[in-house]
Image (cartoon, grey):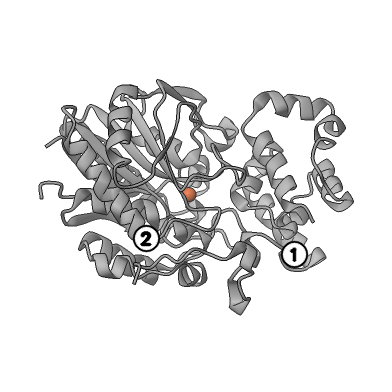
């Protein structure tokens, strides 16, 4: 599981037009410099929005990637829903943190937002 | 007094990018009118520089090096990072205000550790507000982001201190300065729950914000925000900072949960800065 690496790649891609054109020409040369599992690699190779959502990619990163892939808005939302239907609920990252009584994991524990005692 | 205006507004990408998909055109256009009125208010204030307190959404920083607060102090900024066709905002260059920014940075750092960057890329979080507030990109802008995405997040008590420090820093300057805070209230952006809005939660929060109810504002807890207001609710930090900078009562000029295609309760407000 290397969600950090998946998101790092998408973060770099989203904000760098030069990297976008290199990735467009040769996905392997770009993806091979990230430490990805086979599942993560194929999700990025295929532009599989549903699986990337389930793997835990933050929507602020995934949304921009979907725009780069020219996926229409309602299709983007449906692809995430289809991903959950196919692969199960989100496995890691911010959406796996605190919803519906799921306990926070220490790695992603939220900061205390209250006034100090 | 050199702080001449403080306001808040929404910044969701749908506000520009999905305008054509809004079914409630009447409410959409009322919202746009209010945003244009905010632009007019800023102009009337004679502000020479606009500080935008926004939420970092991975346009500038990632989890390899994520500042809690960061100010763009460069001569110019670029944006949007997103596909311009998708956001319906052309890629452009935005003038910065490096001299004023450095003075404010130095002052704020006396009480809050504010990072800085000479390279700043704007995403929808700043581009959507600027599209309405300075559509010709002819006003110097100092962007200032708060990390609202990659926990742990800065505590709300520090957000308040940051707003107050920004106020003091602005008051020390000769230049006339406007501040806008831009963030969502309850929303579940870019997820399958996009379009969900907790209107009751939003209205309660906005009521505390307009009344400068510091105790209530600082009593929000991230776990509860996540449950009731979604991950997007973490962005209340930008709004609380703006209120703290203003110091005076707010006036809610627009709120509507009737534009779910924009994926946020659409909000425009201003604050009294005279106190
Ligand atoms: Fe945002």
Check the residue under mark 1 and report the chain it is in: A
Residue A84 visible in the shown view: yes
The residue nearer to you, when weighing B16 against A66, is A66
Residue A80: x %, y % from top left: 70, 57
Residue A63: x %, y % from top left: 63, 46
Vertical placement of B233 versus A20: above or below? below
- Badge 1 is on which residue? A84
- Residue at 42% over, 22% down: B76
Task: Assign a secondary structure to mark 1.
Answer: helix
Single out the residue that lies furthest toward the right.
A38
Vertical placement of A110 versus B94: above or below? below
Residue B269 visible in the shown view: no
- Badge 2 is on which residue? B156
In which quarter of the view is residue B255 placed? Answer: bottom left
The residue nearer to you, when weighing A71 against B154, is B154
- Residue at 30% over, 62% down: B206
Q: CA distance from mark 1 to mark 2?
A: 33 Å
């Amino acid at each position: 599981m290397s969600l950090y690496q998946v998101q790092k790649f998408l973060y770099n891609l989203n904000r760098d037009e030069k990297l976008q054109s290199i990735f467009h020409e040769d996905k392997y040369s770009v993806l091979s410099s990230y430490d990805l599992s086979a599942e993560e690699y194929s999700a990025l190779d295929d532009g599989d929005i549903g699986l990337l959502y389930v793997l835990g990619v933050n929507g602020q990163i995934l949304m921009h990637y979907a725009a780069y892939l020219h996926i229409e808005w309602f299709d983007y939302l449906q692809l995430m829903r289809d991903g959950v239907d196919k692969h199960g609920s989100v496995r890691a990252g911010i959406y796996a943190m605190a919803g519906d009584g799921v306990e926070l994991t220490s790695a992603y524990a939220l900061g205390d937002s209250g006034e100090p005692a | 007094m050199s702080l001449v205006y403080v306001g808040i507004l929404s910044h969701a990408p749908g506000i520009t990018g999905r305008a054509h998909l809004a079914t409630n055109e009447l409410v959409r256009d009322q919202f746009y009118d209010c945003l244009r009125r905010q632009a007019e208010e800023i102009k009337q204030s004679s502000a020479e520089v606009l500080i935008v307190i926004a939420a970092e959404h991975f346009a500038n920083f990632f989890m390899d090096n994520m500042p809690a607060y960061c100010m763009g102090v460069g001569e110019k900024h670029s944006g949007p990072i997103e596909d311009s066709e998708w956001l319906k905002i052309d890629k452009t260059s935005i003038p910065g205000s490096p001299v004023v920014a450095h003075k404010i940075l130095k002052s704020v750092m006396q009480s809050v550790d504010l990072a800085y960057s000479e390279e700043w890329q704007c995403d929808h979080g700043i581009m959507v507000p600027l599209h309405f507030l300075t559509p010709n990109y002819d006003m110097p802008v100092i962007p200032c982001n708060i990390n609202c995405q990659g926990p742990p997040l800065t505590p709300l008590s520090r957000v308040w201190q940051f707003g107050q420090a920004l106020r003091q820093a602005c008051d020390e300057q000769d230049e006339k300065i406007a501040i806008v805070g831009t963030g969502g209230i309850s929303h579940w952006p870019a997820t399958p729950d996009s379009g969900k809005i907790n209107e009751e939660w939003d209205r309660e929060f906005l009521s505390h914000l307009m009344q400068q109810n510091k105790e209530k504002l600082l009593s929000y807890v991230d776990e509860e925000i996540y449950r009731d207001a979604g991950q997007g609710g973490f962005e209340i930090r930008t709004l609380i900072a703006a209120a703290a900078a203003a110091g005076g009562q707010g006036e809610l000029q627009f709120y509507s949960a009737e534009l779910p295609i924009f994926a946020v309760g659409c909000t425009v407000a201003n604050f009294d800065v005279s106190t």
